[in-house]
Amino acid sequence: MARPVKWRKVGFIPDNTYFTPCMNRGCTCNDNIKKIELKVEELEAIRLKDVEGLTQEECAQKMEISRQTFQNVIDAARRKVAIALVEGNAISIQGGHYTRNICHYKCTNCGNEFEKRFEDNIKQCNVCGSDAVKCRCQGTCSMGCNCHQ
């Protein structure tokens, strides 16, 4: 049996998730263009290493993965970006196996809403002490929250 994939922690979710080459200065859209999918954790690896200038070890620590896994993630990311640039493909940033490591909780007893790391395994409200605490995303969180799983 294969090992389960470890969640990759990301600190940045982009507002712009689709990039397409401009065929000429008139820049008309081309629906037939090939699309390369870049995972959110692959973008995070590029951001940490190439934009923030961190070492491989620092990047791996921030993403809470091993250095070898980080190397595999960034190698895949750089290859995808290079192919898109050389072949004139669009880049779509989506999906992956990542988490922001933050859950949004709500106490159904007092209505208190708060954020905590999902690893903290919240069982009680930090205001009223009730155990009627639920994750607000209920499996629909677009930020990669995995507390409901």
Image (cartoon, rainbow, N blue to C red):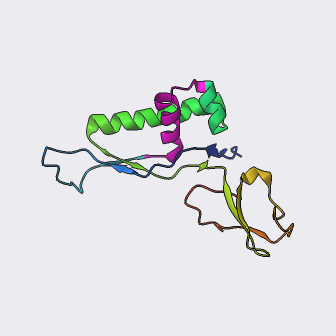
Report the magenta residues as a range.
38-56
Q: Quadrant of residue 9?
A: top right
Residue projecting furthest to the bottom: 109
* Camera-nearest residue between 67 and 134: 134
Residue found 68% across the figure and 44% down from its top:
2
* Quarter of the image with the C terminus in it: bottom right
Residue found 51% across the figure and 46% down from its top:
40
Queried whether the magenta region covers residue 30, the answer comes back as: no
Residue projecting furthest to the top: 55
Queried whether the magenta region covers residue 43, the answer comes back as: yes
In-image side of 25 versus 43 (left or right): left
Answer above or below: position of 16 versus 81.
below
Residue found 53% across the figure and 33% down from its top:
48
Answer above or below: position of 147 versus 24.
below
Q: Residue 71 placed where, x, y %?
A: 56, 29
| Main SS category, magenta section | helix
* Camera-nearest residue between 78 and 49: 49
Q: Residue 51 placed where, x, y %?
A: 46, 31
Q: Is residue 4 visible?
A: yes
Q: Is residue 149 visible?
A: no
Q: Quadrant of residue 135?
A: bottom right
Residue projecting furthest to the front: 127
Q: Residue 43 placed where, x, y %?
A: 48, 41
Q: Residue 91 placed where, x, y %?
A: 36, 46
In-image side of 40 versus 69 (left or right): left
Answer above or below: position of 130 versus 61.
below
In-image side of 5 versus 120 (left or right): left
